[in-house]
Amino acid sequence: MYLREIGWDGMDWIDLAQDWDQWRALVNTLLVLAAVTAIGVVTPGAAVDTEYNPNPQYSFAYKVQDALTGDSKGHQESRNGDYVQGVYYLVEPDGTRRIVEYTAAHVNGFNAVVRREPVAVHAPVAANIVYGTKAYYV
């Protein structure tokens, strides 16, 4: 059976090619829309935050003291509206304690003061393990 027998002529091929280009453009558009929606650039029907707090307030703190590894660090922060203040510290590998006191506000931006002070007790950095006649450092 030839194409002419089922009603196809040369113009039908041109129409079919144009339809294919339109179909391909539609599929590409849908794929792009799906990808953009998946990554969150466009979220149809996105919920509006009705519980917006114009004066947010919070505070938190934590502290780590690990005698086995010598890990010593801590952090404390509080926020009242657009003003944030805090301090964190950690013991550095050279045995000093780094203390960072900071504030952040809408007007002055982020400001930090960094201090270093010696730590009274130094934690061991490496352990010497002996297996037979060979020594290993971990």
Image (tube, rainbow, N blue to C red):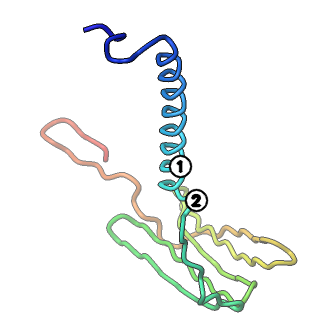
Task: Give residue 88's mark.
Answer: none
Q: Residue furthest top?
A: 2
- Asked if the residues shown at circle 2 and circle 1 are in contact, with their CB atoms under 8 angstroms apart, the answer is yes
Spatial CA span between label 2 and label 1: 8 Å
Which residue carries the number 2 mark? 42
Q: Residue at x 54, y 24 (%)?
A: 18
**Disc 2 residue type (three-letter):** Val
Q: What crowding class fits label 2: few (fewer than 14 Cα within 10 Å), some (14-19), or many (20 or more)?
A: few
Of 129 and 115, which appears nearest the observer? 115
Q: In what element is the residue under mark 2?
A: loop
How many callouts does the rendering have? 2
Instruction: Name the spot of residue 116 as percent of width and height, x first.
Output: 67, 67
Image height of 59 relative to 90, above or below: below
**Disc 1 residue type (three-letter):** Leu
Instruction: Name the spot of residue 138 as percent of width and height, x first.
Output: 31, 47
Instruction: Name the spot of residue 47 as percent of width and height, x first.
Output: 54, 77
Q: What crowding class fits label 1: few (fewer than 14 Cα within 10 Å), some (14-19), or many (20 or more)?
A: few
Q: In what element is the residue under mark 1?
A: helix
Q: Residue at x 77, y 71 (%)?
A: 110
> Which of pointers 2 and 1 lies earlier in the amino acid sequence?
1
Image height of 138 relative to 90, above or below: above
Q: Quadrant of residue 118?
A: bottom right
Instruction: Tell whether 85 sits left or right of 22.
Output: right
Task: Give residue 33's mark.
Answer: 1
Instruction: Name the spot of residue 66 as percent of width and height, x first.
Output: 37, 72
Q: Residue furthest right?
A: 107
Q: Residue at x 24, y 9 (%)?
A: 1
